[in-house]
Structure formats: structure tokens, C-alpha cells
């Protein structure tokens, strides 16, 4: 029996998360899924958005830290 590895899921690159999300949106908008599958796809999409947002937040924090380290405090 195989269990999902939460750490492995979190390591999916941002671009791949977006591709997966776009695929789900295309399926839902294209009417390819029934109601139940559409709801499941929506739930998956929400999780992908959360994970992508986390990656973006970390990137923004990293940029802020890099700027704080490299830019002088008195830039007058």
C-alpha cells in the first residue's frame, strides 16, 4: 500500500502547480466533468492555489531579505 508523501507534494515546482491548476480549470470549464468530479476538481484546485501561494510568499520573503542585506539603510 502506498501513502502520499506530503513533503514530496510540497516540493512540486510552482510552474508545475500552475499547469495542474490550468488543467483542472480547463476540464471544469470545458464541461468534461460531472458535478461530483467538478467539485473534486475544485477542491484539488483550491489545494494547488494554497501551495502555489505558499511558494510565492516564501519567494517574496526571500527577496525582501536579500534586498535588506544588499541595500544600504540610508539611500538618501
Image (cartoon, rainbow, N blue to C red):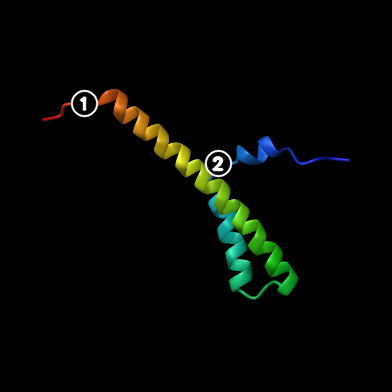
Is the residue marked by circle 2 packed among few (<14), some (14-19), or many (20+) residues within 10 Å? few
Which is nearer the eye, 65 or 52?
Answer: 65
Q: Is residue 60 above or below residue 45?
A: above
Q: Please report the residue visible at 34 percent of the width from the left and 28 percent of the height from the top.
A: 66
Helix, strand or loop at mark 2: loop
Residue at 52% x, 43% y: name it: 54
Q: Secondary structure at mark 1?
A: loop
Image coordinates for residue 41, horizontal then vertical, percent:
67, 63
Q: Position of residue 75 (x, y in %)?
A: 15, 29
Q: Which residue is outermost to the left? A: 76
Rendering quarter of residue 69: top left
The quadrant in which the C terminus is found is top left
Farthest residue, direction front: 74
- Residue 13 shows which numbered tag? 2
Up-down: is 17 above or below 34? above
Which of marks 2 and 1 precedes in the sequence?
Answer: 2
Q: Tell me if 74 is positioned left or right of 15 in this view.
A: left
Q: Quadrant of residue 9?
A: top right
> What is the x, y in percent for residue 1?
89, 40
Residue 16 - label: none
Reading the image, the residue beneath label 1 is 73
Which tag is nearer the camera, tag 1 or tag 2? 1
Amino acid at each position: 500500500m502506498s501513502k502520499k508523501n506530503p513533503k514530496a507534494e510540497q516540493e512540486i515546482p510552482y510552474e508545475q502547480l500552475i499547469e495542474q491548476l490550468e488543467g483542472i480549470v480547463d476540464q471544469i470549464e470545458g464541461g468534461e466533468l460531472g458535478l461530483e468530479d467538478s467539485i473534486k476538481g475544485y477542491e484539488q484546485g483550491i489545494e494547488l492555489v494554497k501551495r502555489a501561494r505558499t511558494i510565492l510568499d516564501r519567494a517574496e520573503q526571500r527577496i525582501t531579505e536579500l534586498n535588506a542585506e544588499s541595500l544600504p539603510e540610508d539611500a538618501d
